[in-house]
Image (cartoon, rainbow, N blue to C red):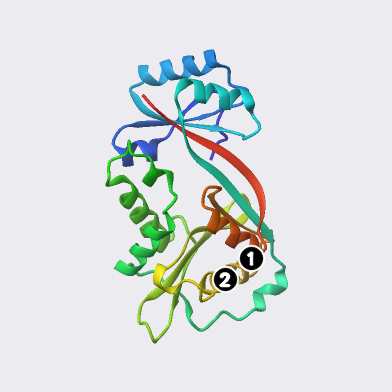
Amino acid sequence: MSTPSVNALQSLAWDSEFMGFGVARLKAENLAPEDLTRCVAEARAAGLRLLYLIAAPDDAASNASAHTAGAWLADRKVTFAMPVGLAEQSALLGPAIQPTTFWTPQLESLALQSGEYSRFRLDANFAPTVFPGLYHRWLQNSLNHQIAREVLVFDTASTGHAQGLLTLGLKNGRADIGLLAVDAEARGQRIGQQLVAAARQRTAAWGLAELQVVTQLDNEPACCFYRRCGFVEWQVEHIYHFWL
């Protein structure tokens, strides 16, 4: 994947196809108001309807330009990372944790629960079908290994259905947790911790030295959970939605 040019529009083919209208990314760096005005004019001329404007939190110029132009701060996206020792590949997974490639309604429910703070759920400008459709496709493409190498579930014989879900892929040279959820009725039983421990074991088994996960800073329960598991903050990005 090519690195987005700074202060230039990057058309997003997948997002545009899925949304049914033109979407582009604008990676901002010291973005002046006149530069944003130019980019918006280019986007409108190209028939786009949505820009994702991405800025570092400490980039005062870009954040000010976005606010002044009326863009909505949709996500303070945080990436957490942690080291994993190769010796962890010999760790035993809990008996309730199993890999799967099969879709079930319960896995769909868990995928949706993982997106409670998703900008695609919180932005009322999206059609109501966008958030569930996006997470349905995310789950399906994880199960068929297009975007995940493994999908792990926590499923005990006593319940007969999955109480937890974790998808694991590769990103930035690290193992990457995509979806992670514990069913609302099963929380407080350390299921999430067991799934993260399994992700650490799989990271080591793949010969990788780091595990990462992305969430939202506004999702305080998730951030606290990841910190308790040993993750530390690696990067924060502000993602604005600019509707045209």
Q: In the figure, 93 relative to 75: above or below?
A: below
Of all residues shown, which one is farthest toward the bottom? 158
Residue at the image position 61 percent from the left and 49 percent from the top: 172
Residue closest to the eye, 183 or 15 = 183
Of the two numbered discs 2 and 1 on the same chain, state the one appearing first in sequence: 2
- Left or right of 197 in this view: 18: left
Binning the other alpha carbons within 10 Å of mark 1 as few (below 14), some (14 to 19) or many (20 upward) gives some
- Left or right of 52 in this view: 63: right
Residue closest to the eye, 18 or 125 = 125
Residue designated by label 2: 193
Residue designated by label 1: 229
CA separation in Å, label 2 and label 1: 7 Å
Q: Which mark is residue 129?
A: none
- What x and y, as percent, mark residue 233? 66, 51
Q: In the figure, 134 relative to 10: above or below?
A: below
For badge 1, the amino acid type reads Cys
Residue at the image position 53 percent from the left and 33 percent from the top: 54
SS assignment at label 2: helix
Residue at the image position 63 percent from the left and 65 percent from the top: 229
- What x and y, as percent, mark residue 189? 51, 76
SS assignment at label 1: helix
